[in-house]
Amino acid sequence: MIYNSAAIITPQGGIDSYRKIHPYLPENKWCAKGSRPVTFETPWGLVGVGICYDTYYFPELARIYAIKGAFLYLNPTVISKKPGRLEYFKTLLGARAQENQMFVASSNLVGKEVKTTNEGKSMIIGPCDFSVSAEPILYALSDAVDEMVTATLNPRKLDEVRKIVPVFIKNPLTGTMDLRPEMYWPLVVHPEYKHLRHWRE
């Protein structure tokens, strides 16, 4: 089987791979669907991986990583150079960071391919803490050239964000976290979603 995969190689020599769970339209001609969300441990915390379409249209994957305790989500991607496209994807990456209270590092291809030109503009983004504005914080953004961008991220910053919006920790008023996973069972089993199952068969 051939997969659209991201290699995971740690400084300690650990090797794994994430296989894209949601191949985009033309990719289905040459690759199989992955079946396993992948996380790996680092000295700073847990990291999860998704690829492009996984990230932009299936927020459930990043949510799974957040529930597992990931502080960082990695997103290798391809964003072609079209008007408004950068802001569109920047908005979606900011949403993943904000709703899951994690950092997101997105690495995009740059330059010409056979039929398209890719945007570059790799970025590292994190949730806002509402101290200055309500916009996610952009820690780094590359130009439309081949380059590496870095940022210093403090996982403790996420603890501050979680105290302000208790999605994953106890709400002091209710004694439970605001996230209610039991409410989302219909995505899998509820008869109202029969029409979705029809398209999957």
Image (cartoon, rainbow, N blue to C red):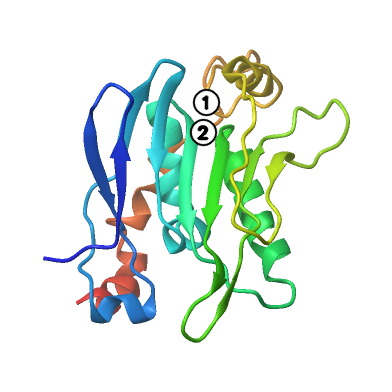
Q: How many marks?
A: 2
Write down the quadrant of residue 3 in the picture: bottom left
Give yes or no for contact between labels 1 and 2 (Cβ–Cβ under 8 Å). Answer: yes
Say which label, 1 or 2, has the lower sequence index: 1
Viewer-proximal residue among 85 and 14: 14
Is disc 1 placed on a helix, strand or loop?
loop
Residue 178 position in % (x across, y down): 56, 29
Q: Amino acid at mark 1?
A: Phe
Residue at which label 1 appears: 168
Query: Which of the 4 quarters of the picture holds residue 119?
Result: bottom right
Q: Residues within 10 Å of mark 2 (few under 14, many from 20)?
A: some
Q: Nearer the viewer, residue 130 or 103?
A: 103
Q: Quadrant of residue 87?
A: bottom right
- Does 63 sit above or below residue 26? above
* Spot occupied by residue 57 in the image (x, y as percentages of width and height): 49, 62
Badge 2 amino acid: Leu
The residue to which callout 2 is attached is 179
- Comparing 164 with 56, the one in front is 56
Q: Quick one: SS at disc 2?
A: loop
Residue found at x 62% / y 19%: 154
Quadrant placement of the C terminus = bottom left
Residue 110 is marked as none
Most extreme residue toward the left, as rendered?
1
Q: Is residue 115 left or right of residue 67?
A: right
- What is the x, y in percent for residue 13? 24, 26
Identity of the residue drawn at 48% across and 59% down: 77
**Left or right of 55 in this view: 201:** left
